[in-house]
Image (cartoon, coloured by chain):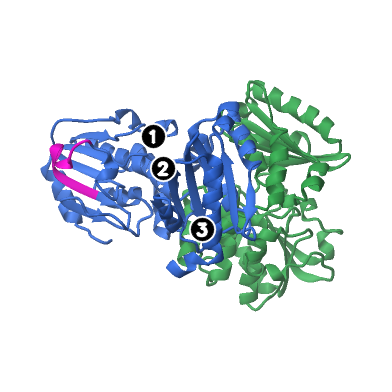
Chain colours: A green, B blue
Amino acid sequence: MDIVDVTAFYEAIKNNNSFIITSHIDPDGDSIGSVLALTLALLKKDKKAVPVINDDIPKKYEFLSGSNLITKRISGNYDALVAVDSSDVERLGFREGLDRYANVIINIDHHKSNTNFGNLNIVDSNASSAGEIIYGLLDGEIEIDYDIALNIFTSIVTDTGSMRYSNTTSLSLRILADLVDKGVKPNYVSRQVFEKRSISSINLLKLALDTLELSADNKVASIYITKEMLEITGALEEDIDGIINYAREIEGVEVAVLFREKEESLTKVGFRSNEWMDVSKIAEKFNGGGHLRAAGCIMKVPLEKARKIVLNTVRMYIMEGFGERCN
Amino acid sequence: MDIVDVTAFYEAIKNNNSFIITSHIDPDGDSIGSVLALTLALLKKDKKAVPVINDDIPKKYEFLSGSNLITKRISGNYDALVAVDSSDVERLGFREGLDRYANVIINIDHHKSNTNFGNLNIVDSNASSAGEIIYGLLDGEIEIDYDIALNIFTSIVTDTGSMRYSNTTSLSLRILADLVDKGVKPNYVSRQVFEKRSISSINLLKLALDTLELSADNKVASIYITKEMLEITGALEEDIDGIINYAREIEGVEVAVLFREKEESLTKVGFRSNEWMDVSKIAEKFNGGGHLRAAGCIMKVPLEKARKIVLNTVRMYIMEGFGERCN
């Protein structure tokens, strides 16, 4: 752990009564699962706990216990705000400074780039997921029942890509085993999270694959998705999840990039790498961030311009073997 | 375990010096990994051990330690033959009876349908994979080094579909964790086994997805692949693997069918189901077979005719709720 004060965490829980539990916009399995696991644990401790995510929750996560409790916007004052899985304050998507919502800010995260924005910071960049940290905090302190287990299992399994990503450790696997012993069915979670396709999502996939482009000796693969593609197919934002892997999984590819046209002059860029490139360094060049093998940024330029700038940079990094130097 | 005599197994290893280690034709990650793990363990014990698989080994498994030792056909006489992951003798693909190759036959398997064909039978249908049983036999008896660990990890991860199938237990996950502690990198194995795409395979996927068709209230989804599609894209037979899942994973679909034009009047049909339909019953109608959730058959009719006949039958079964009756 980079910065840890676990005793202070338990003290903060003990000494406060009302909590906002929140996470980043663009919610995923880890952020939602972690928020809900901690919320359910606090409710079990007879605390007031409100899960807040300032964005839409993808439909596929509605199976998670407690998902019906999630509130989109909140006002009023709480004793404490716990942010999980968010490397900075901006990603939380609140309209005002966090101190307008709560007196104590607790920051629980596994991103290396975390800005330690809390009054209390529990940041462990060796953890596979925020859910893994939450498990460590709860284990032995509260009975982890099926509902909490389901949320933590989903956190870990989504952030490790079902054991496929390099952040999968033996600790992650032992925690998953413990959660299976609490009644979680791995195939049930997989089906909810990875295996629900709509016809629209298949049509989007086909259009996206048509844009697949290789460069830099086939070491770089990129795909783009326009607003129009979503409109034509009727696909949802969440249907974009995973499409970047088609680029990443091509033999010989080291870096995969997915460009998503959000607005006419707003492009979201996702990066993945396979073996050696530290893509968080590339994302940081464009004021983004993330992990060694998965990172992202948002650029205030049109799709075409973003593609040109980013792909040039990626190619330069690839040619210079940049990642090898900084690993 | 259904039938177990572990002490007799250790005795048999101790009292014999030369071993054939073998498994079924149509080899997969579990059969190859289990054969190699046991072979390497016996070699460490200074036994003579030859891994024999009477079929071609898919290229993607060449990364497994010891894969270069695998022999395709064997003659001569050995003290013992150990068959792993094979429910009967026929699946092993030997030309003659097993007693022509060895004096003692040891049968290690996890299929419920195992015929107990060995002199010694270690059959545990609760095990996720043959590799999991091999781990149980070796653990504590021999130092499981990286090479053995890599093989067992690959066995378990392929047979559990990377935690996605219902056979994933907490024991499987704990064994995987132990193997990670021996140095196995989960993302490395996943990349070898699940994540190698070629551009040809992506082009084949696009053509195949264009044929996707839903019927019977969207409960049946089918895809077909013609010889021409393979020719146009340059994709390989193995690139067809997994395409049926795009049909199976569509929300609401119960039965997915993939038609593969082999020759002008020869069509291979694969079936998958999600929740309740016993697709082995459908495959049996056409002289095929398989499991509850995965089955297949080969029909001596052109693709179009096969589609018509099979889809009509599937729809009839779906409408009658056939699977519910026979589960």
Location of residue A19 in the rendering, given as x and y in whole percent from the top left corner: 72, 70
Location of residue A172 in the rendering, given as x and y in whole percent from the top left corner: 51, 53
Q: Which residue is mark 2?
A: B154
Q: Is residue A37 visible?
A: yes
Q: Which residue is mark 3?
A: A187
| Residue B130 in the image: above or below residue A211 | below
The answer to which of A40 and B303 lies nearer the viewer is B303
For the residues carrying marks 1 and 3, which lies nearer the camera in this image? 3
Q: Amino acid at mark 1?
A: Leu
Residue B180, image quadrant: top left
Is the residue marked by circle 3 packed among few (<14), some (14-19), or many (20+) residues within 10 Å?
A: some
Tag 1 and tag 2 share a subunit: yes
Residue B208, image quadrant: top right
Span colored in magenta: B95-107
The chain holding disc 1 is B
Q: CA distance from mark 2 to mark 3?
A: 18 Å
